[in-house]
Image (cartoon, rainbow, N blue to C red):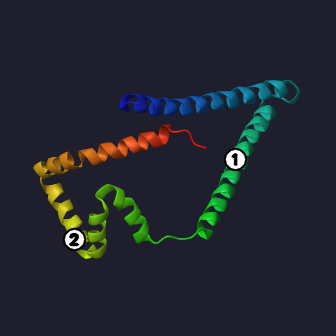
Amino acid sequence: MSVKSKIAAAVSLHMMAWLAMLIALAGIVFLALGVFWLIAPPLGAGVAALIVGGGLLGLILVCTLVAVIVGRLRARSKRLAPHRSTDNRIEEQLRPVIGDRATEWAKANSGIAVVGALSAGVIIAASPSMRRLVYDAARPIIARKALQAMQGLTEPRD
């Protein structure tokens, strides 16, 4: 699968999600309008508008409560899951990017790595030619990470 087709697949997935939300919103609006027209003659327009508006607000409230409950359940399951230290998570993220040898060096010399990173940030912020040099050096890594992200978006989930 080429890069162009991967990008097209991700963009089309994004557009399909927005189209689905637009269709759902239109469906809700027409459903509310239908209920309004159904109950307006016997109850009057004002009462019908209050009932339909209250029903929509109630629907939003129920959806919000369900989202809050699901979020709390997920947070509780994350709390109960085995906790990995921050160092281990950082190491797992760095190892594929910079390799085993550089990761071990950064782990053993964390103070020097922090000072080096801060110094590099100051130098890169001050010098446009240095920014270009760093960008040119990091371009393959950025491209590889972008492709991995695109693959993660386009692969079917089980």
In the current view of this chain or complex, which residue is farthest to the right?
42
Query: Which residue is labeled 2 in the image?
Result: 115
Q: Residue, x 45% and y 31% (percent of image)?
A: 11
Judge left or right: residue 55 versus residue 77: right
- The amino acid type of the residue labelled 1 equals Cys
Judge left or right: residue 130 versus residue 95: left
Quarter the N terminus occupies:
top left
Query: Which element carries disc 2, helix, strand or loop?
Result: helix
Q: Residue, x 23% and y 65% (percent of image)?
A: 117
Give residue 20's quadrant in the image.
top right
Residue nearest the observer in this picture, 17 or 41 = 17
Q: Residue, x 67% and y 50% (percent of image)?
A: 64
Horizontal and vertical percent for residue 140? 26, 45
Judge left or right: residue 63 versus residue 89: right
What is the crowding at mark 2: few (fewer than 14 residues within 10 Å), some, or many (at least 20)?
Answer: few
Q: Residue, x 78% and y 28% (percent of image)?
A: 36
Residue nearest the observer in this picture, 103 or 39 = 103
Query: Which residue is labeled 1 in the image?
Result: 63
Horizontal and vertical percent for residue 3? 36, 32
Horizontal and vertical percent for residue 33? 73, 26
First of labels 1, 2 by sequence position: 1
- In the picture shown, does residue 29 fall above or below 53? above
- The amino acid type of the residue labelled 2 equals Val
